[in-house]
Image (cartoon, rainbow, N blue to C red):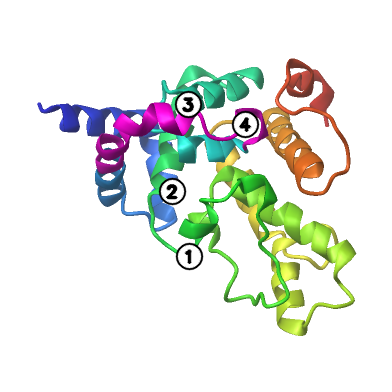
Amino acid sequence: MSDLEERKKFILDQVGEEGLSVLRENGIDVDSAVRKILRRQIMQKKNLERQAESGDISNMMASELVYRSILPDDMYGQEFTRRLSGVNLTDKQISSLYEIEQLILSVDGKLREDRKQPWVRRYFIMHDSTPESIPAKSLLTLSELIMITDDANAAFSRDHHVLPEPAWSALCIAACCADYTEARFAHEFNRRTEKFGWSNKQSRAYTKNECLLTERLKWGNHNEPAWTPETCNLNQYSI
């Protein structure tokens, strides 16, 4: 078996049947996505040192680490593992999620350019948004599912009086802050993490730490760090 075939088999084994089921339900062509990932790894591995020097890793969203990562043992992959180990996910769960998110990120689309900028400051709901223009939930990573919900909730409070009707309709699809909002992306986050075998505490801890990043770096609400032993302690996330 060639090195590429071995790597492909490793990726599929780590994703597992539950993960493959999630991807297929979301319309992801797994074989095509894996081939794209392998080509990207070959082309970019030589640039790893240069890439590792860009940006402050502590300010990156969890799925952004996967986006920037070439292999699970590079600095981004290691930070991803550190964070999720902090909320007591198993090595198998972490490895599976890494590969699943790589596959989602490999699908080309209008998110491609947006993902090149620092994720924490990305906006999803804007004046010209429409229900048709917001991203499909199947093409978003876990962090992006949280980010678009957070962005919509903020716009609900900040911009509700100035948004045109199409943008308001898009906002109500994405937000989860009122009885009449659809919470499409929050429901998808919960559906996926439940299928991945996460506990409610683990899902809430992941969400809280990602929102600590957006609240600090996008909205300027506090100066607290995220993904620390204290913020990952599951005892504080009891329902």
Q: Which residues are magenta?
A: 39-60
Q: Position of residue 204 (x, y in %)?
A: 73, 35
Above or below for 48 versus 134:
above
Q: The residue under label 1 is which amino acid type?
A: Lys
Whether pointer 4 and pointer 2 mark residues with C-beta atoms closer than 8 Å, the reply is no
Q: SS class of the residue under badge 3?
A: helix
Which label sits in the foreground, 4 or 3? 4
The disc, 1 or 3, on the residue closer to the chain's N-terminal end is 3
Q: Nearer the viewer, mark 2 or mark 3?
A: 3
Distance in Å between CA atoms under marks 1 and 3: 25 Å
Tell me if I can see residue 71 in this picture. Answer: no
* Side of 53 relative to 216 (left or right): left
Residue at 88%, 64% (x, y): give it.
Answer: 158
Q: Residue at coordinates 65% horizontally, 77% vertically from top-left?
A: 130
Mark nearest the camera among 1 and 4 is 4
Which residue lies under the disc numbered 4? Answer: 56
Q: Amino acid at mark 4?
A: Asp
> Label 3 belongs to which residue?
77
Relative horizontal placement of residue 219, taking residue 38 as reference (left or right): right
Seen at 70% across and 33% down, the residue is: 200
Q: Which residue is mark 2?
A: 104
